[in-house]
Image (spheres, rainbow, N blue to C red):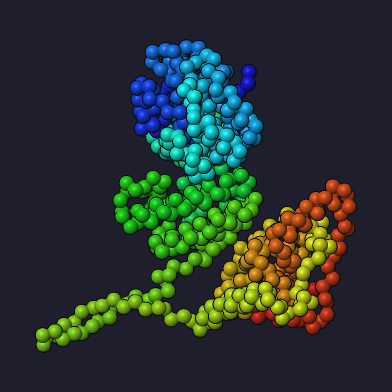
Amino acid sequence: MSYKALYRTYRPQTFEEMAGQKHILRTLQNAVRENKIAHAYLFTGPRGTGKTSMAKLLAKTLNCEGDNKPCNECENCKEIMDGSHPDVVEIDAASNNGVDEVRNLIDKVKYSPILGKYKVYIIDEVHMMSTGAFNALLKTLEEPPEHVVFILATTEPHKVLPTIVSRCQRFDFGRISLNDIKERVKVVLEKENVSYEDGVIDLIGELCDGGMRDALSILDQAIAYAGNDLKCSHIREIYGVTSLKEKIELLNYVSEGNEEKIMEKIASYDDKGVDLTRLTIGLIDLLKEVIVYKNSRNASVLKVINTSSINEFKEQSVNKMFEWINVLVEALANYKKVNAPKSFFELACLKMVNCKDRREMYVVREEPRVEVIENKKVEEKVIVKEEKPVLHEEKKVVEEVKEVVREETRVDVSHETVSPISSEERYIPTEEELLNVLVQATKEDLVAAKQKWVILPKYMNSMATAKVTALLLQGLPVAAAKNMLVLVYENETYLNRVNFVNIHHEMNNFLKALYNENMMCYCVTREDFIKLKDTYMDLRSRKALPSPKAIKFEEEVEDKDEGLEFGKKVFGDFLQVKEE
Ligand SMILES: [Zn+2]
């Protein structure tokens, strides 16, 4: 027996079973009762909000021969339910966007219905239709035969020709309310004889984002995975959501600045296949709610978090939480650019650790103020807010970082016009060099590199290292081998900069001190790295990979000392010199 998805099995077969969209239901039922049927309907709304279900219900109601329409018992109802009714045609425009197919269909429009009273054409994802098909459809809509009803469904109404929209009676399907979804999920669980832990229904409701189809497919997968006894942990495992408790734990590590624990947690998410996009959105929602609660002290605003969990959440200023939200929103935007957003999530967490509360930059103190009013001396206290004195050292770092940014801009401009710097002064890694890293790269080396990146931000605080650290932090380690490291730069301005020979040299020196051994870094764009990986895979499949070569580092005495001196200057006590 073939398996039928829950959302198909539990497609509402009566108007009563339809979740939400009550105003649309009422209007359509009245129209049928009063025999005021439009020739074309446009159902718009997000996926999983019942557009197709409603279209099928309407098709049944229009053709039903029973008293309480749709009766689900007459021949018309039955055939529509199993998809074999000759007069009800369902088309997925996303797969049938050929002009010919729609023309073919429209040619048949003129024939009377075979079995029922109406021919009903349900065209799903109608915005995907080609212009030719649209025009053919438009012609039919201009002079529709009496017995024909079009039901067009779309998630993107703005992409449907206005001339089509204007000929349709339009219904906007809103997201289904959490209560309606939960109720339906409960009914399905009971009908399927599945026992479930408290919280399962809430969790599914939280995950499906107002889409009934999503809610039922989550349930589907959970049952397939866990059998007939559902626990919240099952659903989390499949959907890779982390619980509220875990989210709070992660944020608490961020406020403690416990970078090691943060990286551990992210690694465990990776192992479990946690959906980082969902997690990031979850963290934003959580922070948003805490902010609203902090400002209002009104427990009724809490949906994601509850009052007892708020107490577990390490006290943060509202300002800092806003900064965190900004960092997370930025990360979210970056996820779209890559297949594996993990690195961006890691960076976001590290940035959050380093977020400064703007208020911490001010000193607030009370000062007495004396005024003479009507010959009387009045003394009162006023609150004075002034910028905290910045330490000389800190100021210099700030200046230096600003200088880096300024130079960036200069490099960019000059690059577009006439470059005053000849290409010899740049270090552009060759394909041969990069392949040499890949043939020797190991996972352990990459993990080690990423761990180094975790501690990098603290070198932002030292004048000697701020510049080089800032540049390194713009890159992400993507491949590593002994003495070799490949960094990907999303921003080409930074890449241009780090590839200047002198800066590249400085970076290698810094890495040498950081690693306590020679280190050669190669900086490339993500695009180039992807191409390189393709080349690597191709060569590997043809067994034509180059043999691994060790890098020759200049082992001159002077150079060695230079590296060591630099290291001492930079790391001070951090540097352990290996005596050999
Ligand atoms: Zn019927």
**Vertically, is 524 above or below 210?**
below
- Note whether residue 309 is visible: yes
The image quarter in which residue 314 lies? bottom left
Residue placed most toward the observer, 138 or 398: 138
Indicate the quadrant containing the N terminus: top left, top right, bottom left or bottom right: top right
Q: Is residue 429 left or right of residue 337?
A: right
Residue placed most toward the observer, 288 or 176: 176
- Note whether residue 94 is visible: no
| Residue 521 spot, x, y in % from top left | 74, 67
| Residue 165 spot, x, y in % from top left | 47, 39
Q: So how many labels did they put on this image?
A: 0
Q: Residue lying at the far front in this picture: please name it.
A: 143
Indicate the quadrant containing the C terminus: top left, top right, bottom left or bottom right: bottom right
| Residue 383 spot, x, y in % from top left | 29, 76
Residue located 48% across and 49% down the image: 282
| Residue 573 spot, x, y in % from top left | 63, 76
Residue located 59% across and 77% down the image: 406
Residue located 77% across and 57% down the image: 532
The image quarter in which residue 100 lies? top right
The image quarter in which residue 381 lies? bottom left
**Vertically, is 243 above or below 57?**
below
Residue located 52% across and 17% down the image: 113
Residue placed most toward the observer, 168 or 415: 168
Residue placed most toward the observer, 566 or 55: 55
